[in-house]
Amino acid sequence: MCDTCGCSDSAVRITDHTHTVVMEQDILAKNDELASHNRAHLRASDVFAINLMSSPGAGKTTLLERTIRVLDTPCAVVEGDQETLLDAERIKATGAPVVQINTGAGCHLDASMLHRALHSLAPSPGSKLFIENVGNLVCPALFDLGEAARVVILSVTEGPGKPLKYPHMFAATDLVLLNKVDLLPYVDFDVAEFERDTRRVNPSAQILPISATRGDGLSDWYDWLRQPVRS
Amino acid sequence: MTGVRLEIGRLSGVVPDSVRFCFDVLCTGTSLEGARLDIAEPSGRARCRDCGEEFTLDDFILLCPCGSADVSVLAGRELRITSVEVG
């Protein structure tokens, strides 16, 4: 028993006049718990959620606009941006239900933001839920939202070496979409090298070259959405 | 509180120097003011699915010395409060 306060907690070790309280507490435990809750809720309602991550300007919203118009299943969208309703308005024009989350100074979405968004969005059973994360190749990789799959988009205009420079993002994804391949003749980007770099941090990731504006490779993306690999 | 021990694995994606930088600022005016911060930085460990070898890695280049990239990460993603010291 502790001499100072008489506590009998076995997690407390006493050294001189200080107590060491053993915690072994995961710092992201609260987020992970909420993410599990989201995941269970989404599975039970037969909603397939995809966490879509990329740098700003890689083409997330353009890809979603086109996907929603073509896909034969109902879609809903959660839009994450620091400010404005600009992306939500673009999605709304496609007819899909959408909720915009503005993170202010925040650089990523977390499980509690998605939880609140799900309450107001209530996606219909059998639908695809696209969660467009804040444009950022760093922090979104750390936060499980409760999604069924993760997709990273990189555009060829962003230059070489990104999987090696941002390994956490590329290591944590199920699918990599290499976007803007219609611009390959005008930029210095080696697709084979990109595929090699991606495999070095994520040997099992699938890579699909696409152009969200011209339509290259999109049938492969739609096929993947129809039969996605659950993570 | 007089001290906090954290465990930040080298594959966790969190930068210990950034945590040290903001710790004093965040603790000012709280019961943690003046507390010591100890951060353990366990290395990453992985096992190769091809040759079965276990090896350490401190970045996300998942490459076994045998040349295979088919490896599973065993440790290094820790992000925990190990203990706190109460004076």
Image (cartoon, coloured by chain):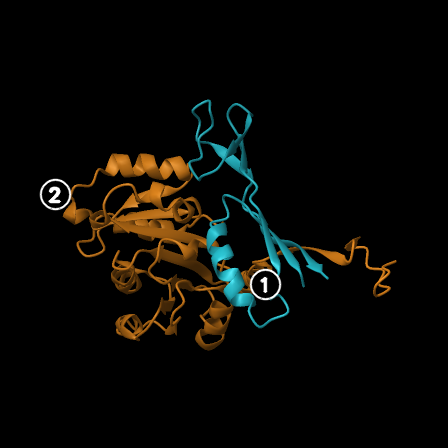
Chain colours: A orange, B cyan
Q: Quadrant of residue A185?
A: top left
From the image, tell me which residue sits under label 2: A185
Residue at 53% across, 62% down: B24
**Is residue A32 toward the left or the right of residue B17 in the image?**
right
- Where disc 1 sits, the SS reads helix
Pointer 2 or 1: first along the chain: 1
Residue at 57% across, 48% down: B78
Task: Give the CA separation, mark 2 to mark 1.
Answer: 47 Å
Residue A42 visible in the shown view: no
User: Looking at the image, is mark 2 or mark 1 nearer the viewer?
Assistant: 1
Q: Are marks 2 and 1 in contact (CB under 8 Å)?
A: no
Q: Quadrant of residue B36?
A: bottom right
Which residue occupies the foreground of this view, A210 or A73? A210
Which x, y percent locates residue B74?
57, 38
**Residue type of the residue flagged with mark 2:** Pro
Residue at 35% across, 51% down: A152
**Is residue B12 toward the left or the right of residue B32 in the image?**
left
Furthest-bottom residue in view? A120
What label sits on residue A79 in the rendered view?
A: none
Q: Chain of mark 2?
A: A
**Residue type of the residue flagged with mark 1:** Lys
Which x, y percent locates residue B56?
53, 32
Vertical arrangement, residue A69 with respect to residue A148, above or below: below
Callout 2: few (<14), some (14-19), or many (20+) C-alpha neighbours within 10 Å? few
Vertical arrangement, residue A134 with respect to residue A90, above or below: above
Which residue occupies the foreground of this view, A64 or B53? B53
What label sits on residue A30 in the rendered view?
A: 1
- Where disc 2 sits, the SS reads helix
Which residue occupies the foreground of this view, B39 or A51? B39
Which x, y percent locates residue A37?
58, 64
Residue at 22% across, 37% down: A190
